[in-house]
Image (cartoon, helix red, strand yellow):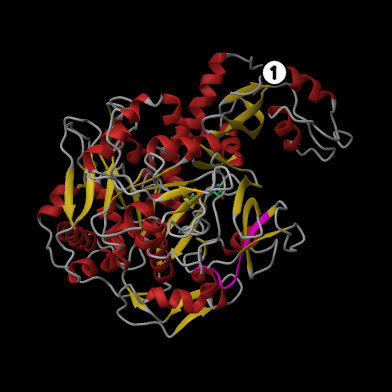
């Protein structure tokens, strides 16, 4: 490989501040500061301008319409997102470009590449398969799949026929799948017999079988990934490859209304019940397309790799839709970064000449811990840009990513956003900068964010408060919670009213608008980059009949960012033991999946409560963080705190 381009230069005056070089500016889609002022002067006109870069069967009549909890974008417009990802690329002469590269976990298996034409063919066939199963526009379809190309094919086919996909992370438990399929009223589930994880074949079909019991699901389509036999339920289960064999390749993408529901994605809120975040077609398409293009500097020939799972919003937007909207190659890796050894990430980058890498701080901290010798074995000079997402990044992780992985050449684009926002919202642009560890950056052009105090006043630069997003809302912002618009209003639009979306994140901003995100201000945790509510873990543990009371709080963790700590009061007659601890971990596994497991279960005789009987989680949180517990005078049982102090006797790590 030739001399890799140097994207960044150091600020001559400030430490750890970097700017794009002249060469980077020349290459970037936007490099002129004036883009911010232009977008701010008329955000609606800004989004309209770039909406014209994608394909519409019919242009919109009105770009933005506001009503409380019922804002709309590109009203009256008709488009199809999958058509935009595939047909549009083929029409533009990009059909022979590689759309997807799939890297299986077992190293002896060959990678698979699919061109835009091939992907189009498979998606068209699968669209016909779904139609053949009686799926029509507006039907909800569950996707419970590992990281295999068929996951992308399934999502694309849903979008193509106007069915609403609801992807459930493959490591989530059968109970999680069931709850989501019931809430969504799903008719069909698409799954696989299994996948490889750290060299082991994992049986996914078994979980799918349990998870669809007691749901409205009538058909289960199963992709064959493993070389083993799988029990199939007659009349319900169908093999993907058999259905595909007979399917026609010709399929006309459905004309969707801009505001037609595109997908549901369940995410953790502050209660025990995850909420079905709704995303609609037009606004989501436009913001996904533009943010990926500008933030990751996507150009023809790029091999872009986002390491998220398709089960999370990052996988939806930045593995599937956005890279394909931009005509680049999206890399999909099936397995674990330590299989067969700690060098796998870097081996994949060298092998496929990856140009952009988008990953999470928790992963970066893990790579850092594994040591520099692993990345040093591989040629990473193909990398031009690095991205991070999911949680606040620390300086060490940022600098390591920048220096060791990016060779000090590549900008680190720290993107803040949420399942609810659908696409990136806060980050600096690669052609404008600056790139500063722990600073995500300015709001993306056309997005208006401010830091507010609890009363809703805009704070002065440097002051810590809550990040709020102002109307005109960015086009990809969620349109609601499926089946629960009251909760939607209560969660996002009561703090600051209907014209200011409450993000639940703390932040501070400097005088130039550069924003540092300090983390969630509610009871939602970020555990190894996975979003999880303390209430979810509590309600999972409470399902075990030996548990009398339970309180879960989060605690910072060096590697995972945050971890849940559970305080458990067992029912009378049940002794504290490691056996019970194991059993409780098993309960969490069953209800949520391994991502919900507490880092520690602490058995207690009492938990601090208010006089009205509410558990004082604030006190528990202070205890596990080794912080002052504050005023205890309102407690019913202040003596409980002393016992807890001796139980929570660990610090750090
Ligand atoms: C956090 C993930 C700091 C934040 C796309 C947010 C971040 C939650 C960043 C959403 C970042 C995401 N810096 N914190 N760059 N990106 N977060 O819905 O607390 O899984 O509210 O979406 O992750 O998590 P979600």
Determine the secondary structure under disc 1: loop
What residue is shown at x 43% (from left), y 52% (from top)? 313
Count residues near mark 1 (Cα–Cα under 10 Å), then give few for <14, some for 14-19, many for 20+: few
Above-or-below relation of 237 to 550: below
Instruction: Measuring from the top left, give residue 377's x and y in whole percent.
Output: 29, 28
Out of 296 and 69, give the one closest to the viewer. Answer: 296
Q: Is residue 473 a member of the stretch shown in magenta?
A: yes
Quadrant in which the N terminus appears:
top left
Out of 119 and 407, give the one closest to the viewer. Answer: 407
Examine the rendering and report whether any part of residue 528 can be seen. Answer: no
What residue is shown at x 35% (from left), y 78% (from top)? 78
The image quadrant that residue 232 belongs to is top left
Name of the residue lying farthest toward the front: 12
Name of the residue lying farthest toward the left: 246
- Report the number of numbered marks: 1
Residue extent of the magenta highlight: 466-474
Out of 206 and 55, give the one closest to the viewer. Answer: 55
Instruction: Measuring from the top left, give residue 419's x and y in whole percent.
Output: 49, 54
Which residue bears the numbered disc 1? 649
Out of 233 and 455, give the one closest to the viewer. Answer: 455
Above-or-below relation of 40 to 110: below
């Amino acid at each position: 490989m030739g001399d890799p381009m140097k994207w960044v230069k150091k600020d001559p005056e400030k430490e750890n501040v970097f700017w794009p070089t002249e060469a980077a500016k020349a290459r970037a889609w936007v490099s002129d500061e004036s883009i911010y002022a232009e977008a701010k002067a008329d955000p609606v006109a800004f989004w309209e301008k770039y909406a014209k870069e994608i394909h519409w069967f019919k242009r919109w009549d009105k770009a933005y319409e506001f009503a409380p909890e019922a804002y709309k974008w590109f009203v009256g417009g008709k488009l199809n997102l999958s058509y935009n990802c595939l047909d549009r690329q083929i029409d533009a002469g990009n059909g022979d470009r590689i759309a997807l590269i799939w890297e299986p976990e077992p190293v002896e298996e060959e990678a698979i590449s699919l061109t835009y034409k091939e992907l189009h063919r498979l998606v068209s066939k699968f669209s016909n398969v779904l139609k053949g199963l009686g799926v029509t526009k507006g039907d909800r379809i569950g996707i419970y799949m590992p990281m295999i190309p068929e996951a992308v094919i399934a999502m694309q086919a849903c979008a193509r026929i106007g069915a609403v996909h609801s992807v459930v992370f493959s490591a989530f438990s059968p109970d999680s799948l069931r709850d989501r399929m019931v809430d969504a009223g799903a008719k069909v589930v698409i799954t696989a017999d299994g996948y490889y994880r750290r060299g082991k074949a994992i049986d996914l079909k078994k979980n799918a079988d349990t998870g669809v019991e007691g749901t409205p699901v009538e058909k289960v389509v199963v992709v064959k990934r493993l070389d083993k036999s799988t029990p199939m339920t007659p009349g319900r289960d169908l093999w993907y490859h058999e259905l595909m064999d007979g399917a026609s390749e010709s399929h006309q993408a459905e004309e969707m209304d801009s505001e037609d529901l595109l997908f549901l994605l369940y995410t953790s809120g502050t209660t025990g019940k995850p909420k079905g975040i709704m995303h609609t077609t037009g606004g989501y398409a436009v913001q996904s397309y533009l943010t990926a293009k500008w933030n990751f500097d996507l150009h023809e020939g790029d091999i872009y790799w986002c390491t998220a799972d398709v089960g999370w919003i990052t996988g939806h937007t930045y593995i599937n839709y956005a890279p394909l909207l931009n005509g680049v190659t999206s890399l999909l890796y099936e397995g674990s970064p330590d299989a067969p050894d700690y060098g796998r990430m870097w081996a994949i980058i060298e092998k496929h000449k990856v140009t952009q890498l988008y990953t999470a701080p928790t992963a970066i901290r893990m790579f850092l811990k594994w040591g520099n010798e692993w990345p040093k074995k591989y040629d990473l000079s193909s990398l031009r840009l690095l991205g991070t997402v999911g949680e606040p990044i620390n300086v060490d992780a940022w600098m390591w990513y920048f220096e060791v992985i990016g060779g000090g050449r590549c900008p680190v684009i720290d993107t803040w956003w949420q399942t609810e926002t659908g696409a990136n919202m806060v980050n600096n642009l690669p052609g404008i900068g600056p790139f500063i560890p722990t600073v995500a950056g300015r709001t993306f052009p056309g997005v208006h964010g401010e830091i507010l105090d609890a009363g809703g006043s805009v704070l002065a630069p440097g002051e810590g408060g809550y990040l709020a997003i102002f109307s005109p809302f960015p086009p990809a912002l969620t349109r609601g919670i499926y089946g629960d618009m009251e909760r939607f209003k209560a969660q996002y639009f009561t703090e600051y009213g209907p014209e200011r979306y409450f993000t639940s994140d703390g932040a501070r901003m400097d005088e130039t608008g550069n924003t540092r995100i300090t983390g969630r201000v509610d009871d939602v945790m970020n555990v190894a980059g996975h979003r999880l509510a303390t209430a979810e873990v509590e309600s999972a543990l409470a399902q075990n009949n030996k548990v009398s009371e339970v309180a879960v709080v989060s605690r910072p963790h060096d590697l995972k960012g945050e971890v849940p700590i559970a305080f458990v009061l067992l029912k009378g007659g049940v002794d504290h033991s490691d056996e019970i601890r194991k059993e409780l971990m098993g309960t969490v596994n069953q209800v949520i999946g391994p991502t919900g497991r507490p880092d520690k279960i602490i058995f207690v005789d009492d938990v601090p409560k208010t006089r009205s009987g509410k558990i004082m989680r604030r006190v528990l949180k202070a205890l596990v963080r080794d912080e002052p517990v504050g005023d205890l005078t309102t407690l019913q049982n202040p003596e409980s705190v002393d016992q807890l102090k001796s139980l929570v006797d660990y610090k750090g790590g």
